Image (cartoon, rainbow, N blue to C red):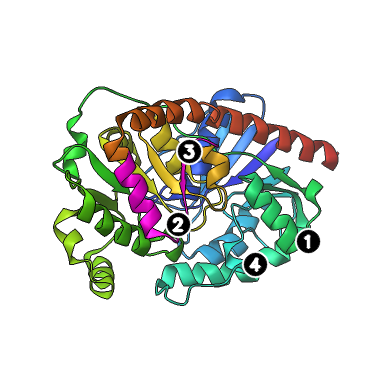
Amino acid sequence: MRIGIEAQRIFRKNKHGMDYVVLQEIKELQKMDTRNKYFVFVAPGEDRCLEDTKNVHIIEIGGNFYPLWEQFTLPKAVKELNLDMLHCTSNTAPIHCKVPLILTLHDIIFLEPRDKSNKSLYQNLGWFYRRLVVPKILKKCKCIITVSNFERDNIVSKLNIPQERITMIYNGYNEWFKPTQDVDQVYKKYIDDLGYFFFLGNTDPKKNTERTLIAYSMYLEKSDIKRKLLMADLDKGYLDDIIERNHIENIRNYIVMPGYIVNSDLPYIYNNAFAFLYTSLRESFGIPLLEAMACGTPVITSNTSSMPEIGGTNAILVNPDSPEEIAEKMLLLEKDDQFYRKQEEYGVKRAQLFSWRLTAEQLLNIYDEVYRRKQ
């Protein structure tokens, strides 16, 4: 087979969730499949995190404005290479494509009610683009892939797509996320103290940053230890607004905001954290949840969307709308050593159910099936 994979953003320096998913899928396919030929379409970027091999070819095509790149530059390149199929990996795809199309639809948040407080131009433009493109391409897809049973059921119910047209494939996590006894100095690039709470917050309303910070204020009021909170991907102005609006000045001297944390440093960040707060309002999968558990770091996560499915029945599940409940679990981990140790052990065991190898094997089965249907 001659298989095209869209991976437009993987060479950008500051990668995010969907970028890492397709990058790891390609790396696994590169290791396990020497029979088929792959053509990986990327935009130019400074982080060349993937290299050509005998049957995996990196096709660098220009244009940083994503809609034009996807709708015009990509299908033109696909046509020139005479491919058997194209796998688009980040929710959208070309409306006009001459080869069988496979789409990974991570979520349909773009169809859900919008939070009017979201001022991010990038996120808002992405929302409009997906809302325009996705309904036009779904009927053309030979296979739609999503990443959890929660999201599959959500897509079926909201878009009236027959269940047999959607395949669920779980994401995995990288093997370097594991427990370690070494107190590596890498974490000191971001924070001086060991035993902190860690939170991957940003300005996206679904990340629930505001309620999580209110919960942290409540924790500080009752804790004798008063652990610091390390927050990635957040700027000072956004934090100041939350502090002033909620009158939680007591958190200011305990927050550490280093900006973007590169993925290769995250194992050290998780291992040296006391606990990880993954208190989103909504996630289609939640790779950071797996990464923290794989490191043996207790996780407080939400009882909504996919998080109970990925975290499992013995995860620490809270109502993300309740800062009181989040704070209560933070204090419980701090005060109950036996409960803390059980969560360490549970997380490592739970994470072993997921792997990028398994993800890639299931993906290859889909490519085979689409190719057989084409013949």
Tell me if 250 is positioned left or right of 316 in this view.
left
Report which residue position mark 1 lands on: 160
Around disc 2, counting alpha carbons within 10 Å, would you say few (fewer than 14), some (14 to 19), or many (20 or more)? many
- At 26% from the left and 63% from the top, the residue drawn is 235
Q: Which mark is residue 320?
A: 2
Could you tell me if the residues under marks 2 and 4 are in contact, i.e. CB atoms within 8 Å?
A: no
Tell me if 128 is positioned left or right of 316 in this view.
right
Instruction: Give the SS element for disc 2.
Output: loop
Magenta stretch: give its range: 313-332
Which of pointers 2 and 1 indicates the residue nearer the eye?
A: 2
Tell me if 44 is positioned left or right of 6 in this view.
left
Give how far apart the Cα atoms at labels 2 and 3 are. 14 Å
Report which residue position mark 3 lands on: 315
- At 50% from the left and 36% from the top, the residue drawn is 24
- At 60% from the left and 38% from the top, the residue drawn is 170
Name the amino acid, label 2.
Answer: Pro
Q: Which quadrant of the view contains residue 255?
A: bottom left
Which of pointers 2 and 4 indicates the residue nearer the eye?
A: 2
Mark 2 vs 3, N-terminal side: 3
Which of pointers 4 and 3 indicates the residue nearer the eye?
A: 3
Name the amino acid, label 1.
Answer: Asn
